[in-house]
Amino acid sequence: MEQTFTYREKIKQIFILLIPILITQLGMFSMVFFNTIMSGKYSPYDLAGVAIGTSIWNPVFTGLSGILLAVSPIVAQRYGERNTKEISVTLAHGIYLALMIAITVMILGFFLLNPLLGLMNLDANVKSVAHDYLIGLSIGIIPLFVFNTLRSFIYGLGKTRIVMYILLLALPINLFLNYVLIYGKWMFPELGGVGGGYASAITYWFILAMTALVIKIQEPFNQYVKLASFKDFKWSKCSEILKIGVPMGLSIFFETSMFAIVTILISQYDVITIAAYQTALNIVSFLYMIPLSISTALTVLVGYEVGAKRNKDARIYSFLGIGLAILIAFVTGILVITFRYDVAGLYSNETAVIQLTGHFLIYALFFQMSDALQATTQAALRGYKDVNIAFIMTLIAYWLICLPSGYALARFTNLDASGYWIGLTIGLFVAGIALAIRLHQVQKRKFGIIQEKVS
C-alpha cells in the first residue's frame, strides 16, 4: 500500500487490493459451491444434508473466525505507523488464539452435534448426511482457523495477491477430491455429500502449509516472523485482538446465525423447499463475495490511513468502497433475476427445485443491495476500530427485526417460505442504514479532531 492523492489513485488502490481478495473469496466459496452442486447432482437428500450441515457450521466458523479478522485492522494501523515489532507480536498472538478457538470448537462439537441435530425434525437420510459431512469437515478445523489468521496478517500489510495464488493452486485439488469422494471414482469410496466434507478438510491442510511456507521464506512477510514474539506470550496482547475481534465476530455470528435459523425453520417444509432455498441462498452468497471482498479491502485501506493520521483519505475510501459495492450489487441483482432459471438448473436436475429456486431469486436485487450496504459500512467502521456500537446495531437488526418479520410473513400470510426472504432483506437494510449513520458520526468526530489540531 502507498499514500494516494487523487480519486483516480484511490479507486486504483481499491482495485489493486480488491481483485486478488475477490478471487480468493470466490476460491474459498467455490469449495462450498462444488460441495453443493455435486451433492445436488448425487441426490436431493445429500443436497439437503449438506445444506443443514453447512447452516450449522457457517455461523460457528464465520463468527469465531471473525474474531481473528481483528488481526487485519490492527496490522494495517501498525503498518501505517511503521511499527514492525507490534506487527510481529500481533501475528504470534493471533496464531495462538486461532489454535485455542479451533480446539474449543472441536471439543464442543464432540458433545453437542448429535443433540443439535436431534432437535431438528429431519428425514433420517438427511440427518445422517449432515452429521457425517460435519465429521469429515472437522478434520480441517485447525488449519482453517490458523490460515484465517495468516490471511488477515497478509491482508493487513496490503499484500493480497499471494493468498490468491495459493487458493488458485488449491482449487483443482479440492475439485478433484470432491469428484472422487462424492461419486466414488478411481477406487475412492463413494461417500455422497459426506465426501465434500472430507475434500474440504484435506484442502484446508494444503492451504495452510502453502501459506506458512510463503510467510517463512518470502519478503516482506518473513521480517515479521520473530521467534521471540512466539516465546513471549502475553495475555494482554490476546486481549487487544479480542477487544476488537469479539464484537466483530459476534456481528458476523448474528448475521450468519440468522441465515442458519431461517434454514432450520425452512427445514420444517418438504425436501424440495429445503433444496430450493439452499440453492437460492448459495447463488446470492456466491455473488456476495464481491461486496465482501470490497469490505475486506476497505477495512485495510481505512485502517492504514487512520494509522498514518490521514483521516480525510480514510473518509474518501469509505464512501468510494460503499458506492462501488452497491453499484455492483444492483447490476448482479438484475442479472440474477433475468437468468434465474438457467442458474438454478446448474444446481439440480429436479424441475420442482428449479422452479421454486427461480421464484426465491426474484427477491435477489433488493436483498443484494441491502447486504452490500451493511457489509461495507461495517467494514469501514472496523478500519476505525469502532466495533462495539456496530455489534449492538446488527444484533437488533438481525434478531429483533429480521427474524420476527420473516417468521410473521411466512406463517401468517400466503407468502410461505418467500416471507423469509423479505424478512432477511428488511433486516439487512435496517442494519445498513443504522451503520451508515454510525460511520458518519465516527468520521465527523475524527475530522473534527484533526481540524482542532490544525487550528
Image (cartoon, rainbow, N blue to C red):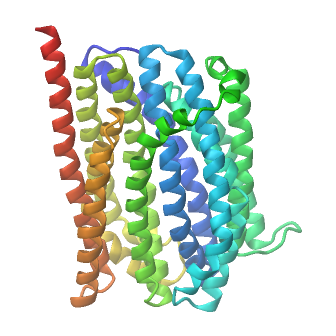
- Quarter of the image with the C terminus is top left
Q: Quadrant of the N terminus?
A: top left
Image label count: 0
Residue 278 visible in the current orientation: yes
Image location of residue 286, percent across then percent down: 46, 57
Residue 233 as seen in the image, left or right of residue 77: right
Could you tell me if residue 287 is visible in this image?
no
The image shows residue 437 at horizontal and vertical percentages of 16, 44
Q: Position of residue 256 (x, y in %)?
A: 42, 62
> At x 72% / y 23%, what residue is drawn?
227
What residue occupies the far left of the structure in this picture?
455
Nearest the viewer among 160 and 387 is 387
Residue 240 to residue 76: above or below: below
Q: Note whether 252 is above or below 345 in the view shown.
A: above
The quadrant where residue 443 appears: top left
Nearest the eye: 107 or 235? 235
Q: Nearer the viewer, residue 207 or 302?
A: 302
Q: Which of these two is toward me, 191 or 362?
A: 191
- Residue 6 figure quarter: top left
The residue located at (70%, 75%) in the rendering is 132
